[in-house]
Image (cartoon, grey):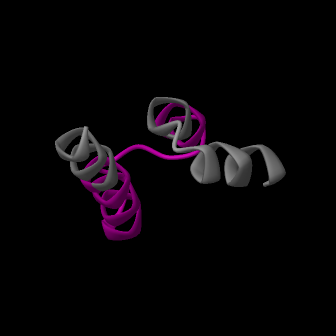
Amino acid sequence: MKYFEEKVQAGEWDEVEKYLAGFTKVDDNRYSMKIFFEIRKQKYLEALDK
């Protein structure tokens, strides 16, 4: 969990997605879909900010 937390706090969204993909897929259930959506939304918002 520490690794995941560090990557989230550092904003390393590609690494966060890769790590999470080792445990679940986007279409596994609605919770998986929601977490992947939030990660991608944050990645998008940060890209707009640059």
- Report the span colored magenta: 17-41
Magenta segment: does it hold 15? no
Q: Is residue 2 left or right of residue 4?
A: right
Magenta stretch: helix, strand or loop mostly: helix
Q: From what the image shows, is residue 13 above or below residue 1?
A: above
Q: Position of residue 38 (x, y in %)?
A: 33, 60
Q: Quadrant of residue 5?
A: bottom right
Task: Return the residue found at the far front.
Answer: 50
Q: Position of residue 8 (x, y in %)?
A: 58, 51
Q: Position of residue 28 (x, y in %)?
A: 37, 53
Magenta segment: does it hold 38? yes
> What residue is at 25 percent from the left and 54 percent from the top?
41
Q: From what the image shows, is residue 35 above or below residue 15?
A: below
> What residue is at 35 percent from the left and 63 percent from the top?
29
Give the camera-side residue of 28 and 17. 17
Q: Is residue 48 left or right of residue 33?
A: left
Give the camera-side residue of 13 and 22. 13
> What residue is at 22 percent from the left and 45 percent from the top?
44
Q: Quadrant of the N terminus?
A: bottom right
Q: Quadrant of the C terminus?
A: top left
Task: Return the residue found at the far left.
Answer: 48
